[in-house]
Amino acid sequence: MDLSYTPEEEAFRADVRDFLSEKLPKALSDKVRDGRALTKDEHEEWHAILNARGWLAGNWPEEHGGTGWNAVQRHIFEEECALAHAPRIVPFGLTMLGPVLQKFGNDAQKAYWLPRILNGDDWWCQGYSEPGAGSDLASVKTRAVRDGDHYIVNGQKTWTTLGQHANMIFCLVRTDPDAKAQEGISFLLVDMESPGVEVRPIVLLDGSAEVNEVWFTDVRVPAENLVGEENKGWTYAKYLLTHERTNIAGVGFSTAALAAVKRIARAEMAGGRPLIENALFAARLARVEIDLMAMATTNLRVISQAAKGQAPGVESSMLKVKGTIIRQEINDLARRAAGPYALPFASEAVDGGNDPIGPAYARPVAAQYFNNRKLSIYGGSNEVQRQIIAKTALGALK
Amino acid sequence: MNFELTEERQMLQDMLRRYLRENYGAEARNKIIESQAGFSAEIWAGLAELGVLGALFTEDQGGFGGAGFDIAIVFEELGRAGVVEPVAETCVLGGQILAAAGRADLVEQVIAGGLHLALAHGEPSSRYDLAQVATTAAAKGDGATLNGRKAVVSNAEAAGHLIVSAREADGLSLFLVPRDAGGVSLQGYPQIGGGRAAEITLDDVDVPKDARLGAPGGALALLEPAVAAGTVAICAETLGAMETALRLTTDYLGTRKQFGRPIGTFQALQHRLADMLIELEQARSIVILAAGHLEAEPALRDRHVSAAKHLIGRVGRMIAEESIQMHGGIAMTQEYELAHIAKRIVMADHRLGDTDHHLERFIALGA
């Protein structure tokens, strides 16, 4: 048992910190800290800065232009980025599609698409969820029918995050409607500029425009855009989901968010004293801080196993549930800490307004609270995760 | 970063687990709990012989362990088996104080299994506050005369010596008092989580000069590290007991049939089991954190210790209550093995500070 990082890991952390203090533009970190939405250009700017340093693809092997980092290094990088309020790396090309292409794509696909992801030539989005397929992903209905050297795609995807910026979408499509649910699915890369693709924004309850519906009407997709084998897409989809679940605990985000709550609670006054000295508020804050301390250690336990080559199993589900509960609890504390000035509608105050109302720290808190209700819904809802945990413990019961 | 046990600790853990599996089953345990002494001299000798007691002391102190992680793995195993023998009282609380005060001869007896100790510190109105002591020590010649009352002193009846805190002119001091010294009277009773305790009255108890442990007014300097180690011990013990509660509950969900199928097929219970398993990992992590900070500087140490005791109290209650509920009626019986485990878990919250006490302390140490 040794809870400390090695000298090499500490040196790596120092490198990351130096890099962030030197290269992370203040305009970006200010926006992230204040909970304001980033533009497409700003996302691309940060990607380009990371790519210039060779640090954009933290989970890719070096042969494909990645960092080759192990799980501990990735964790350190993600933690430092979160604490420095760096923009989140847009995950669709880098975290999700990249590993699938590296494992299942053919040589031509790897040679063409992977460098374009690193260079920002394409903005990818994820075509998984459908109106009838949420956590039950295998029930996708979007159809792809082979027609010579093309597929003809018809159907609808939804909850497509940042699809409004994307020129490419990777999709789960049904190629064999007669097979069992998991067996007739294929993994297809679709050009969003093809005729018949339509993107419609979904405005979320916090006023944000981050997700979309994507409609496909007789969209012709070259057959060379099929990844791997036809009807084997479920295997690739599951592989992608294991990568989606890296950093699932969100320790860095929660740590930064907890620090933000403390800043608010020091500035807000309650009964003539800083709110942070209020016994009830302090107790709620301390409770979640202790939960976070424990979860950060659980996360490190899983990471240290992963760095030794052991794939996390049910621990990912545990971290997903506990990590999202903690983040949501911190969001709730931030909202309450802000008091009455949480009430002005955030989308105006945060992204537009020349003359914002109330203290700056109060503006995003209600919107973030509502936006982050998604955490326990997406990526396999917390109920689905609990099902996985219980099934693993109980085995098959009859 | 490394979360694996060293080879020595792994061996200690395996050996202790095997010993307790063979000698401390539910039936044997229930007999021990109901016995007059409240614990088994045979088991105590066994633990000493295996080196379990020595593993709780550093080499300098005459043992061969004594680090936070040694304490944690020993107590996790004791907790897993629901052991009621007063290891925390004698070896951690009492033993650490005597070791720090330089009483190597007595520590040697403790490690050999020949001496029991009891920390007679708490009082009827002190609750969990270490600094609240009304018992007095009046100077008398070279020595002192002690007067006062001590409350819920665990292991007092078996102890050869009591470690008594009392207020004197220089402040709060500790004194080593033979349990059978004149003026010491005990009113003993069993505790609901197992083991015995006593209310102690000190009525003009004369002690010689060398009874004082540490410097005059130096009680807290001795108490605080020992209580920190004792708190880690109780947290680890409770973690072990929670593992047993979850094992019993998981087994029961898989075998108990209602409405023609195992109750573990019901989603209402599955999701609650999942939450228990998640919280168990939280508990395991916080014990690792606290054990890993036991040798840190005091404020950092105590912040982690309080975080652990708070979380263990909260999670322990959840796991004990949910285990009983998911078992149903059978868990309400004294005889079924979950009963003792659940009581041990819940009542641990009353030893060395409960979940609220430690939350408050965590907040105070964070400012």
Image (tube, rainbow, N blue to C red):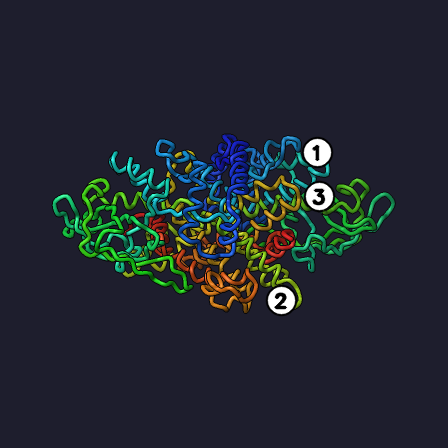
Instruction: Give the vertical position of A204 relative to B146 (above or below).
Output: below
Image coords of residue B241 (percent x, y): 49, 48
Q: Are marks 1 and 2 on the same chain?
A: no
Tag 3 subunit? B
C-alpha separation, residue under disc 3 versus residue under disc 1: 18 Å
Mark 3, residue position: B222
C-alpha separation, residue under disc 3 versus residue under disc 2: 40 Å
Q: Are marks 3 and 2 on the same chain?
A: no
Tag of residue B105 = 1
**Residue at (38% x, 57% y) in the render:** A210
Instruction: Give the vertical position of A314 relative to A283 (above or below).
Output: above
Instruction: Give the vertical position of B321 relative to B44 (above or below).
Output: below
Q: Disc 1 or disc 2, which is closer to the eye? A: 2
Q: Nearer the viewer, residue B307 or A396?
A: B307
Inspect the image, locate mark 3, and give the three-letter code of the amino acid beneath it: Leu
Image coords of residue B237 (percent x, y): 53, 46
**Residue at (69% x, 59% y) in the render:** B124
Can I make out residue A176 in this image?
A: yes
Image coords of residue A364 (percent x, y): 49, 61
Q: Residues within 10 Å of mark 3 (few under 14, many from 20)?
A: many
Image quadrant in which you'd find residue B350: bottom right
Mark 2, residue position: A270
